[in-house]
Amino acid sequence: MLLTFAGASKTQRNTIDTEEGEMNIGDVAHALLLLVEKLIMFLMEGKTRFEQNPGNNGAQRVIADWEKFDTPDNTEFDMTFDGPTSHGRNGKY
């Protein structure tokens, strides 16, 4: 749908009134498409950096941690909450 608007001719019917003046719907759609393209490129570059990073913040480390801590969904765990002061144990002050 944005592509349809981006290719629309500049007529009075294809303009909208804004506080800054009249804007052509095609120009707005074109600007939105450019923004979406920039967002996609940013995400793709981040994905590539993450996948190729051999350090602690890379994909290999995340996969290793996942394999280390992967458990079945029905596994029960014992948990404690020490609170922000670390003085409480098992819900006791």
Image (cartoon, grey):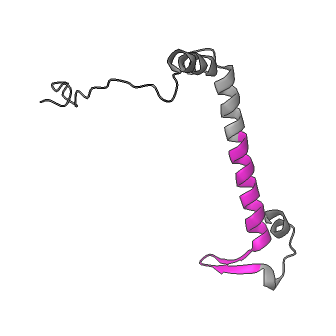
In reply to whether residue 71 is colored magenta, the answer given is: no
* Horizontal side of residue 9 vs 30, given as left or right: right
Question: Residue drawn 50% across and 19% down?
Answer: 69
In magenta, the rendered stretch is 15-41
Question: Residue drawn 18% across and 28% down?
Answer: 85
Give residue 15's position: percent from left, percent from top.
Answer: 75, 79
In this view, the residue farthest toward the bottom is 12
* Horizontal side of residue 20 vs 31, given as left or right: left
Which corner quadrant of the image does residue 77 belong to?
Answer: top left
Q: Nearer the viewer, residue 27 or 84?
A: 84
Q: Nearer the viewer, residue 68 or 87?
A: 68
Question: Residue drawn 87% across and 75% down?
Answer: 9
In the displayed structure, 37 sits above or below 78; it is below
Which corner quadrant of the image does residue 13 belong to?
Answer: bottom right
The C terminus is located in which quarter? top left
Which secondary structure is most common in the magenta stretch? helix
Question: Residue drawn 22% across and 31% down?
Answer: 84
In reply to whether residue 39 is colored magenta, the answer given is: yes
